[in-house]
Amino acid sequence: MARCTGSREEVRDTGMSKRLEDYAMIGDGHTAALVGSDGAIDWLCLPRFDSGACFASLLGTEDNGHWTIAPQAPVLAVSRRYRPGTLILETDIRTAEGHVRLVDFMPHRHGNPTLVRIVEGVDGHVPMELTLRLRFDYGRSVPWVRRTGTGISAVAGPNTVTVASPVPLLGEDMHTVARFTVAAGERVPFVLSWHSSTEPAPDAFDAEDELHRAEAEWLAWSHRTVPEGPWSEAVLGSLIALKAMIYEPSGGVVASPTTSLPEELGGARNWDYRYSWLRDASLTIQALAQNGCLSEAVAWRDWLLRAVAGDPAQLQIMYGIDGERWLPEHELPWLAGYEASSPVRIGNGAAGQFQLDVYGEVMDAMHQARLMGMAPDDDAWALQLELVEFVAEHWREPDEGIWEVRGPRRHFTHSKVMAWVAFDRAARAIEEHGLPGDATRFRGLADEVHADVCAHGFDEHLGTFVQHYGSDQLDASLLLLPLVGFLPADDLRVAATIDAIADTLTQDGLVLRYRTDGDSTDGLDGDEGTFLLCTFWLVQALAERGDRQRATAVFERALEVSNDVGLLAEEYDVNHGRMVGNFPQAFSHIGLLAAACALATD
Ligand SMILES: OC[C@H]1O[C@H](O[C@H]2O[C@H](CO)[C@@H](O)[C@H](O)[C@H]2O)[C@H](O)[C@@H](O)[C@@H]1O
């Protein structure tokens, strides 16, 4: 069993999960793995983000699959970092016998999926132990494991995983172990590869060559954007995290590489985020485009064209990473859930919802990308016009909104505002970029929605905008009113809304989406943490209003909750002092980037 320091050791010994903060992500543009600070890889889906996991102990127990490499003796200290500008993780582990470094990465996918672990001796002689439990189908299927000339091969139905190493790998009680000692200056590689069971095993390759190649490829990418200013490290880290959430073959973007990490510890708000939401992807692409990554924006635009091709009335708010439409939601009863947060779900029922805001987000992403230099495309513009026509026909209808409520549809103020965005951006594309269309008509529709929102989305008595028409509740999505240009930040109604959210919809300086206590509109039992994207919106809204000091304080508070390698989950539970929700979450890193940009703008 891997050992770690202090309270972390207690957590592992009692069979409980590690904190989400204890994980780092590595990925190859097709999938991603979570590596714990104790040397355990507890989550990995192969060959794609949305495939079954072969390591799923994150959502269950060690029997659901993990790959741990750790010292045999008690660990005295752990520190880790990514190599600058890359997603190559280095974990330094110190014991009484010496100091080892784990170098973990997934080479950029050129052939079969591969995960490389190199154990580097830094000081002394450190006896190490490897435990490999492959469990396909999300931790359920035990493979048939055979020795090969270079290591082992594990087969279960369509999946075969090979692990190669100079160290002997031994079978022991339904898993694989290795015990070896690493001396200062030595490097011991382990290479895990996946292949379809109907195909031959991939050729062996040299772990050190792949390390150099991976570093060079990451640096070539990250050197395209050189953030400046006090938060440049956090900005670059967020850009790399977002890049790792793009499924490279299609340009689709996952909301997160994980499923069912709970929004409430022990609760049931557990969702599968390994899909491509139009909303999350639009915001991801905007964030990347604003930081000079235009090719990702173009790839996503092409993904969008393929995903929504056909009847615009059949547009979904989310798709699979290749544009798949059928994403039925299932529960996996054999997984106990992260810290007993069940059910564990795969698929996502929200795919069938009507969320009016996504049309505005897609229109805005295209608009912003054009402003950043993305060349217009006839097919993309034709699609955009179809989307706006759909909004013209449906904007008066209630919807499930940005938060994907599972309660009744409502007239969400944010949804209507995003309908305004759709019309506004259509008019501006025609007026400012010379694209064909009737700008006057779209401007008229925008004005009509604007008047509707001001009449029904604002509560005279409270003096603030409200979550949905007729409600007396606040909602953090209202922070977007000034950010999308619906009204200026110093408009009295907007300013009062920002203040009310800052004062009453926050916990310990972090912003809640909405109140889940009392009569929540989301139709779900239980509670949730503060929502990091919303916290970053507050930073932007305050900065937009000129309140830079307060904006900076909120930003720094949000940065405080990121982990030692700069990653953020979806939410933060201030009562337990822990990240919650899927991890890492694109939304949170998008927010960080937008907020840093707002603070950098004079
Ligand atoms: O919390 C309830 C909902 O949670 C998920 O939706 C959230 O994540 C989405 C992906 O990041 C995001 O687009 C949305 O705005 C968030 O509310 C989940 O997918 C839903 O099924 C669930 O109802």
Image (tube, helix red, strand yellow):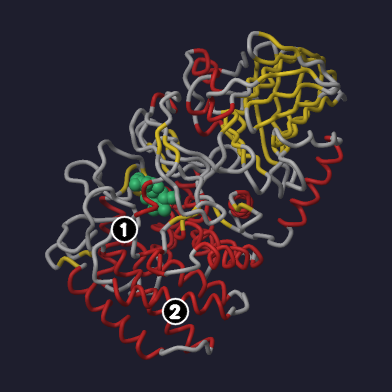
Q: How crowded is mark 2: few (under 14 residues within 10 Å), some or many (20 or more)?
A: some
According to the image, label 2 marks what residue?
Answer: 385
Tell me which corner region of the image, top left, top right, bottom left or bottom right, holds residue 4.
top right
Tag 2's secondary structure?
A: helix
* Three-letter code for the amino acid on which mark 2 is drawn: Leu
> Do tag 1 and tag 2 residues touch (Cβ < 8 Å)?
no
* Three-letter code for the amino acid on which mark 1 is drawn: Gly
User: Residue 76, position in %: x, y?
Assistant: 65, 17
User: Residue 34, position in %: x, y?
Assistant: 59, 34
- Say left or right for 254 vs 484: right
Tag 1's secondary structure?
A: loop
Residue at the spot 67% in from the left edge and 17% down from the top edge = 131
The answer to whether the beta carbon of the residue marked 1 is less than 8 Å from any atom of ligand 1 is no
**Whether residue 23 is situated above or below residue 173 in the rendered picture:** below
The label nearer to you, 1 versus 2, is: 2
Q: Earlier in the sequence, mark 1 or mark 2?
A: 2
**Whether residue 332 is situated above or below residue 210 in the rendered picture:** above
Q: In which quarter of the image is the N terminus?
A: top right
According to the image, label 1 marks what residue?
Answer: 401
- Say left or right for 451 vs 40: left
- Marking on residue 598: none
Residue at the spot 67% in from the left edge and 38% down from the top edge = 81
The answer to whether the beta carbon of the residue marked 2 is less than 8 Å from any atom of ligand 1 is no
Separation of disc 1 and disc 2 at Cα?
22 Å
Residue at the spot 82% in from the left edge and 46% down from the top edge = 213
